[in-house]
Image (tube, rainbow, N blue to C red):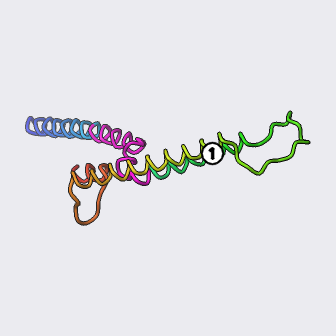
Amino acid sequence: MSSLKGQAETNADQIIERMRMVRMSGKAHAIDLQGKAKRLVDWKEYVKAKPILSVASVSLLGFGLVRSLILAASKPSPSSSTNQPIRSGTSPLKTTLSSSVANLAITVVTNAVKAYVANLMQNGITKGNLHDRFQQESSKD
């Protein structure tokens, strides 16, 4: 009878130990998933993975926004007189603003290309598929 009792205690201890290990691994997996979820919603990860695409899309968005502001500013206000003739020329402000925006876009794209090439030169060009940081860290686990 005592051997059955000793075996039952051993089985109970083994079960308790296994449950403790399952709980600890569950906590570790939850912490790991939390870190991965934070990286998935972090915009910096996407900019690091695809810098040229990020700069191009932001530049396009900025160009569209500035252009819509210029068009809104060039529309006559409702309180102005409608009897005045419409001139075919552009205003100096509009010309200056559009050339400034074009210069800014060229500068941003040039700097992005320079940074991308410098990054490639510094890290070396690897053969095969290039993976972003998230995929590399996931494969280590």
* Nearer to us in this view, 95 or 109: 95
| Residue farthest toward the right in the current orientation of the protein | 83
| Residue farthest toward the left in the current orientation of the protein | 3
Residue 44 picture quarter = top left
What crowding class fits label 1: few (fewer than 14 Cα within 10 Å), some (14-19), or many (20 or more)?
few
Residue 133, how many percent across, how many down? 29, 49
Image quarter in which the N terminus is found: top left
Residue 74, how many percent across, how many down? 73, 42
Is-magenta flag for residue 51?
Answer: yes
| Residue farthest toward the bottom in the current orientation of the protein | 128
Q: Residue at x 49, y 44 (%)?
A: 104
Residue 117 picture quarter = bottom left
Residue 96, how many percent across, how many down? 60, 42
Residue 134 falls left or right of residue 85: left
Q: Residue at x 86, y 33 (%)?
A: 79
Residue 99 versus residue 19 in the image, above or below: below
* Nearer to us in this view, 135 or 103: 103
Span of residues in magenta: 28-54
* Nearer to us in this view, 140 or 63: 63
Q: Residue at x 43, y 51 (%)?
A: 109
Q: Which residue is mark 1?
A: 95
Kindly identify the amino acid type of the residue bearing the numbered disc 1.
Thr
